[in-house]
Image (spheres, rainbow, N blue to C red):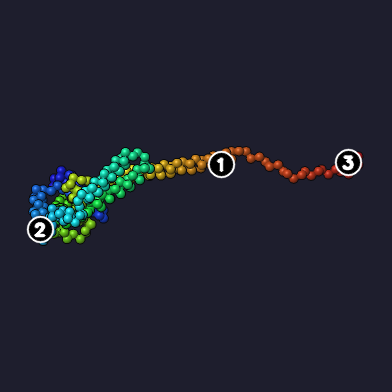
Amino acid sequence: MTEKEIGSRREFEDPDGKTTYYIAAPTAEDIRGADWHYSKTYTKSMMDGINTSSEMMDHLMRRGIIGPEFDKRQAELTNALTAKAIELQKCEDIDEKQGLAIEVAAAREKLFNWNQRLNGPMANTCEQISDDARLEFLTCRIVQNADGTRAWDTMEDYLKEENQGLALRARFEVMLFLQGLQSDFLEQTPEAVALREVEDEARKRAEDAMAELEKEMEKEMNQEIEKEIQAEKKPKNKKKSTRPRKKKAVSKKKASE
C-alpha cells in the first residue's frame, strides 16, 4: 500500500482496546465479490422458502401489523421527536437542558421501538440476509492490520473468528464506513451533545466551587498566621502582684519617742 492509501484509512479499536484495526476503501474486485455473495445468498434464501421484502410486507399488512394506523403512529412519534429536538436546540438554560435531553432520548427510543414492528420482520427477508452476506464479505476484505495486511485471509476465517466482539465491531464499523457515517455518529445526536454540555457545566461548577473553597481556606489560614505574627510583636506587660505589701516593723525605740 502507498503512504497515501495508508493515511486515508479509518481506524478503530477492538473491544478490549489493545489492538487498532483499519478500514480501507474497497477495490473493484472487492465490490464484484460482494455482489456475487449477495446474489448467491439471495438465490439460496429463495430456494429455502424465505420471504422476499414484498412478500413480508404483504404478510404484515394482512396481519394488521403495519398499515394506516402504523403509519399514523409513526408520524406522531416522529413529529414528537422533532419537536422535542428543536426545543432542546433552542434551550439555553443549562439546568433545563438535562431534562429536555432525557425527553428527547425517550422520544427517540419510542420511535425506534415502534419501527421495530416493521424492521424486525424485514431483517429476515431474502434481501436483508443477502445484504448481511455482502457486508460480511466486504468486512473480511477491507479490514486491515496496521501494516496493510488483511485481518482475515478469507470470509471463512472471519466467520470462524473466536473473538466475536471483534467480528461484530468490525462489521459495525464497515457498515458505518460504507454509509458515510462516522464511528461516533450516535454521540452527535442533539440529546448526546446536550448531555455532554450539562456534564461539562456541572464539572465547571464543581471546579469553581472547589477553587472558591480553597481560596476561603487560604484566606482563613492567612488571617490566623497574621494574628499569630501580631501576637508575637505585641510587648508583654509585667504582671502586677496582687499580694498585699507587708508593713515595715517599727522599732520599739522609735515608737516610744
- Which residue, given by chain and number where applicable, does mark 1 sit on? 228
Q: Is residue 238 visible?
A: yes
Rendered view: 152 above or below 237: below
Counting from the top left corner in percent of width and height, residue 139 is at 16, 53
Residue placed most toward the observer, 243 or 134: 134
- Which residue, given by chain and number where applicable, does mark 3 sit on? 254
Q: Residue at x 54, y 42 (%)?
A: 224
Q: Choose top left, top right, bottom left or bottom right for residue 137.
A: bottom left
Q: Secondary structure at mark 3?
A: helix
For disc 2, the neighbor class at 10 Å (few under 14, some 14 to 19, many from 20) is some
For disc 3, the neighbor class at 10 Å (few under 14, some 14 to 19, many from 20) is few
Marks 3, 2: nearer the viewer: 2
Q: Quadrant of the C terminus?
A: top right
Name which residue type carries label 3. Answer: Lys
Marks 2, 1: nearer the viewer: 2
- Which residue, given by chain and number where applicable, does mark 2 sit on? 46
Q: Is residue 22 visible?
A: no
Apparent side of residue 45 relative to residue 104 in the rendered image (left or right):
left
Residue placed most toward the observer, 168 or 120: 120
Q: Choose top left, top right, bottom left or bottom right for residue 60.
A: bottom left
Residue placed most toward the observer, 140 or 59: 59
Q: Residue at x 36, y 42 (%)?
A: 96
Name which residue type carries label 2. Answer: Met
Counting from the top left corner in percent of width and height, residue 61 is at 17, 54
Name which residue type carries label 1. Answer: Glu
Q: Secondary structure at mark 2?
A: helix
Rendered view: 87 above or below 174: above
Q: Earlier in the sequence, mark 3 or mark 1?
A: 1
